[in-house]
Image: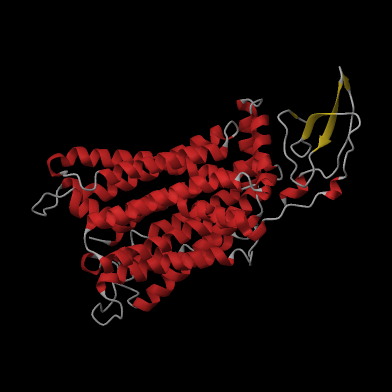
Amino acid sequence: MDISNSLSQSRTISNQETGSEEFESVTKNDYGLELDSEIQETSTISDVTLVKPIRSAEVIESPTKFEKPRDRLNIVFFIFFFFGCSSLVAWNMFITVSFDYYEAFKLQTSDGKSNWYSQNFQNAMTICAQLPSAIFCILSIFKDLRGNLPFRMQCSLLISGTVLLITMTLIYVETESWIPIFFVFTLFTVVVLNAAIGVFQNAMFGLVSTFPFKYTNAVIIGQNFNGILITLLSISSKLVSNNSQISAMIFFGIAVLMILACILLLMLVQKNEFYRRFGVLDKINSQRSIQENDQNFWQKIGHVFKKAGWQFFNIFWLFFVTLSIYPNITVYIRPKDPESFFISEKFYLDVVTFLNFNFFAFLGNLAANYVKFPGPKYIIIPVLLRFWFIFYFPFCNYNPEFRRFDVFFESTWLFIANLAFMSWTSGYLSSLIMMYAPRTCSDPQLQRLAGMISLVFLLLGIMSGLCFSWIIKLIVLN
């Protein structure tokens, strides 16, 4: 349901004597009138009443004289796109430099020998990243009805930027003499960074959930475009320099600049007429939520699960399947004949795995803007059929030297095609589900709650998929 249908298009006037002043009671219309400082609540969110003093001689204009706000030049759309792109930039930069910078440089001794810290950094980093992100996403839901989402996003961005700046100051600091302390400190920064990212993403999806479909998809498109951007940066850095310190400085520096731009855009977009027309619901929800008790909150949670429960399952299962395979399995799938393959081994992983996945996921996101099939009722069918990928990829040329089972699918081109199809369906179906889930509820406040819960199940799917990928590894390998 378009959110504009939930706002009343009528205006009522009631004059009351209060000393020397009269008061006008005006029902919020569909044309983006600003809220005054006093809000008189009515029985539903659709009937938001504005109260302001007027003079008795004032003339009340018809609402038909107001022009319905439009997103001129798609400014708000592209700002949400940039929010999505920036939401994961800090963490993706961390992942990109983790092997060359942390595992192969900072956590090793001067003789280049690996140790316990370098060998276990990747696993420890993954755990320290996903757990706080999911926990803080869940906590954000409980604070949802009492919080200002744009302010929450700004605070999260400031924390992320601060963590990156601290990380940059340590790039040229000698750490060989205190590797254990540096290891623990780095994991601590990962926890703080991903907690901030979890809060930012939750607030972002909650904020955009009351906008039309394409704005939710703009966020998801931005997140997948970020993957393309990071992959291209990784390829470029390998062409330019092999110095891990220079690469880390460039990557983290770009992330800081994007976060600063995101903070600026977040302040500017709140002045946009189109944004304020939908963002007014956030102000309404904040006013209403102060009066609500825990019992009402749990009733809302129950109502949202009743309406959107299947969509929550869909988003969980979709990302469970995807993250069971990508990247922990796909990065170890090698070409059948590496010497004759047209992409060199140096760039094989970046191009065939990362760029392939991110590019087609991005195309899937774009396709969801124009085609919305299947609908909410039947989208579970293609979501369940994606279980095929959990069977297919482990039986490709995955770690051929250490397998206990034979390779069933040797073709490198078939692997590339299946990875492209998996990523396209992941992008397309995730966009549809994240658009469908909030719209299962008619109340804009519940739509926002449904959007935030959807993100929690998305993160739970990611965590479960990453854990299951280790089970696949134990089953397939000796």
Quick check: 445 above or below 395? Answer: above
Q: Residue at x 36, y 50 (%)?
A: 467
Please, which residue is most extreme toward the right here? Answer: 57
Q: Residue 254, image x and y in percent?
A: 37, 54
Q: Is residue 5 left or right of residue 206?
A: right
Front-lying residue, 474 or 342: 342
Query: Looking at the figure, which quarter contains the C terminus?
Result: bottom left
Q: Residue 443, image x and y in percent?
A: 70, 42
Q: How many marks?
A: 0
Q: Is residue 172 visible?
A: yes
Q: Residue at x 77, y 49 (%)?
A: 5
Front-lying residue, 466 or 455: 455
Quadrant of res 178:
top left
Quadrant of res 420:
bottom left
Please, which residue is most extreme toward the bottom here? Answer: 340
Please, which residue is most extreme toward the left here? Answer: 111
Q: Residue 471, image x and y in percent?
A: 33, 54
Q: Residue at x 39, y 48 (%)?
A: 256
Q: Residue at x 27, y 43 (%)?
A: 169
Quick check: 155 above or below 371? Answer: above
Quadrant of res 338:
bottom left
Q: Residue 431, image x and y in percent?
A: 56, 58
Q: Is residue 461 visible?
A: no
Quick check: 104 above or below 235? Answer: above
Front-lying residue, 10 or 250: 250
Q: Is residue 210 left or right of residue 92?
A: right
Q: Looking at the image, what colour scheme do you see?
A: secondary structure
Front-lying residue, 305 or 186: 186
